[in-house]
Image: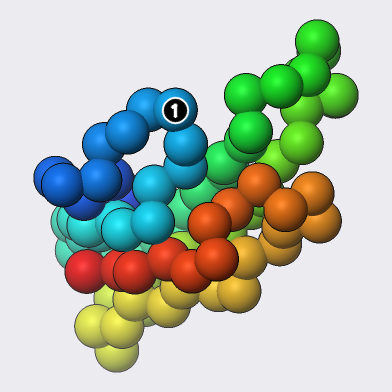
């Protein structure tokens, strides 16, 4: 199994984090993916403000779960739309 979040086809402005995602799930086994988004600043990896969102696939239930975003630096848009 695998999880692949992609920016929606109409939301590909590379100067900002996308508001809309299309998620591709390749079933076959349980899986988990952490999407990490940043604001493009920082001199070293430790200095880059990031936000993390965990996506999980439960193979037996056939359910994709999208966790709440951990965004302590405010780098995300006001809301995300997932398809």
Measured as percent of width and height from the top left, residue 22 is found at 22, 57
Q: At x 16% / y 47%, what residue is drawn?
A: 10
Q: In this rendering, would 20 be left or right of 34? A: left
- Most extreme residue toward the top is 43
Image position of 14 with respect to 69: above or below:
above
Rendering quarter of residue 47: top right
Where's residue 27, x and y in %?
19, 63
Quarter that holds the C terminus: bottom left
Q: Residue furthest left?
A: 9
Q: Is residue 49 above or below residue 80?
A: above
- Residue 60 visible in the shown view: no
Q: Residue 15 or 68: which is nearer the viewer? A: 15
Is disc 1 surrounded by few (<14), some (14 to 19) or many (20+) residues within 10 Å?
Answer: few
Q: Most extreme residue toward the right, as rendered?
A: 47
Q: Total of numbered circles in the picture? A: 1
Q: Residue at 59%, 53% (x, y): give it.
A: 76
User: Residue sitting at 37 percent across and 28 percent down?
Assistant: 14
The colour scheme applied to this rendered structure is: rainbow
Q: Quadrant of residue 9?
A: top left
Please indicate whether residue 23 sits to the left or right of residue 14 in the image. left
Is 45 above or below relative to 73? above
Q: Is residue 34 left or right of residue 28?
A: right
Q: Which residue is mark 1?
A: 15
Residue at disc 1, secondary structure = loop
Instruction: In the displayed orientation, state which residue is furthest to the bottom.
Output: 61
Residue 76 drawn above or below residue 65 = above
The x, y position of residue 67, in whole percent, is 55, 73
> Is any part of residue 7 visible from this angle?
yes
Q: Residue at 32% across / 50% down in the picture?
A: 5
Q: Quadrant of the N terminus?
A: bottom left
């Amino acid at each position: 199994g695998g999880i692949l979040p992609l920016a929606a086809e109409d939301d590909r402005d590379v100067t900002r984090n996308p508001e809309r995602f299309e998620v591709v799930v390749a079933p076959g086994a349980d899986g988990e993916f952490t999407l990490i988004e940043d604001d493009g600043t920082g001199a070293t990896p430790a200095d880059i403000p990031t936000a993390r969102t965990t996506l999980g696939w439960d193979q037996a239930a056939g359910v994709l779960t999208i966790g709440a975003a951990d965004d302590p630096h405010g780098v995300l848009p006001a809301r995300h739309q997932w398809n």
